[in-house]
Amino acid sequence: MPNVQKVTSAGLIHALRTEARAAPPSGIVEAFHYGHNREGIIPLWVGEGDLPTPNFIHEAATRSFAAGETFYTNQRGLPELREEIAAYLARVYAPQLPVNGLYSPDRFSVTIGGMHALQIALRLVAGAGDEAIVITPAWPNFRGALVVTGSEVVEVPLHFSGAGAGGGWQLELDRVLHAITPRTRAIIINSPSNPTGWTASREELASILEIARRRGLWIIADEIYGRFFYAGERAPSFRDLIDADDRVMFVQTFSKNWAMTGWRLGWLEAPAPLGPIIENLVQYSTSGVPVPLQRAGIAALQHGQDFVASQVARAKDNRDLLAEALAKTRRAHFAIPAGAFYLFCAFDTTLDTRTLAFRLVDEARVGIAPGTAFGTGGERFIRMCFARRREDMTEAARLLSEWLTGDVSAKHDVTNLAPSPAAAPR
């Protein structure tokens, strides 16, 4: 018999491709694992609300299952759903305008959630040796999705100038221009932003679009929180400015607007000529989205306006409650978020925010996401999701205020603090 050496775990891992091994762990997941099984924890760490999916949505899926719609389906999605997506966007973004090429069903492909849409978009435009600009602080999955394609992430941080008039998070366009190199392929921009709540103005979007047009770059726009905007019906959008053939792709999901995080249903919007290529990428990744889920998506788009409006109103009330309570402590520093449903906040403490996340679980019974998970510019901050019931937010505001004003950080030695084994990132 040939002499076969035993392969170690390290050897197995070393045999993988560099891109897979380089995929970064999630700091959000680490914080979640540390505290998710603690009794009495108020969980503000994950980017989802606490409401279940409305009955009218899951009943549409139930009817589809009962009708036997359990077979393979259109790779890009049911024509009925793609038509409904186009009609929904036209209602929200162009109610006073004639429907044009931006609202053709040919621009839309149904995906397994927004993450799948993002992965397909990046496969279309970026790979080994390429660079992509990410406006940070940002959802960590942007970095992760780029790393596994072999692309290099170039972070362009927003500037935080403090709270109050003229303060907040600001995009400095010169930083974007200086970050562009001959290897740059795309700019990824999330507005309204997870985690900061920063929302680009129409003028800022126009400037970014002009830069991309002039340099031949793609824009990957994450406007998932576009309806969670607190100064109008919806946030400014690239679709207010683009032509149908501009190099702009939108990643979208049903998760936030319609409380469907666990359904894993989303869509990718791209210029219509890309449709056949996107269809191939769907075929070679998921082979399509289950029909009952798509029927649920149709119901959400057709009948979900009141639910969206109620969620936005609820989030705004919670935002104001949390911000007012923390501002009174004079030990919390943040900008009031214009959109999304997160408060991104710096506390007066010498603790790094990863350690702070563990401490708040142990001492305040509140779960938060550390700012170190969100890239350059986020290191001093923590993220709190306020898309929860009023009672939870009232209690969280009280506990965090007491922690801040009680000088808890001075009472404990944190030098040996480390997460339990259960906190290891997945």
Image (spheres, rainbow, N blue to C red):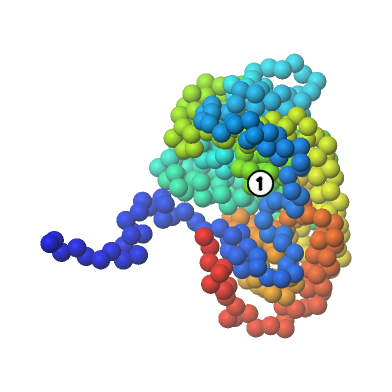
Residue visible at 76% across and 58% down?
334
Residue in front for this viewpoint, 122 or 172? 122
Picture quadrant where residue 8 is located: bottom left
x and y, in percent, of residue 308 in the image: 79, 39
Residue visible at 69% across and 83% down?
412
Residue in front for this viewpoint, 144 or 128? 144
Quadrant including the N terminus? bottom left
Residue visible at 73% across and 27% down?
88
- Position above or below: 371 against 56: below
Dot 1 amino acid type:
Thr
- Position above or below: 143 against 96: below
x and y, in percent, of residue 288 in the image: 52, 33
Mark 1: which secondary structure?
Answer: helix
Residue visible at 78% across and 73% down?
403
x and y, in percent, of residue 86 in the image: 68, 24
Q: Is residue 44 visible?
A: yes
Residue in front for this viewpoint, 224 or 133? 224
Q: Is residue 239 visible?
A: no
- Residue at image mark 1: 261
- Position above or below: 332 against 17: below
Q: How many marks?
A: 1
| 10 Å crowding of disc 1: few (<14), some (14-19), many (20+) | many
The residue positioned farthest toward the left in the image shown = 1
x and y, in percent, of residue 230 in the image: 82, 43
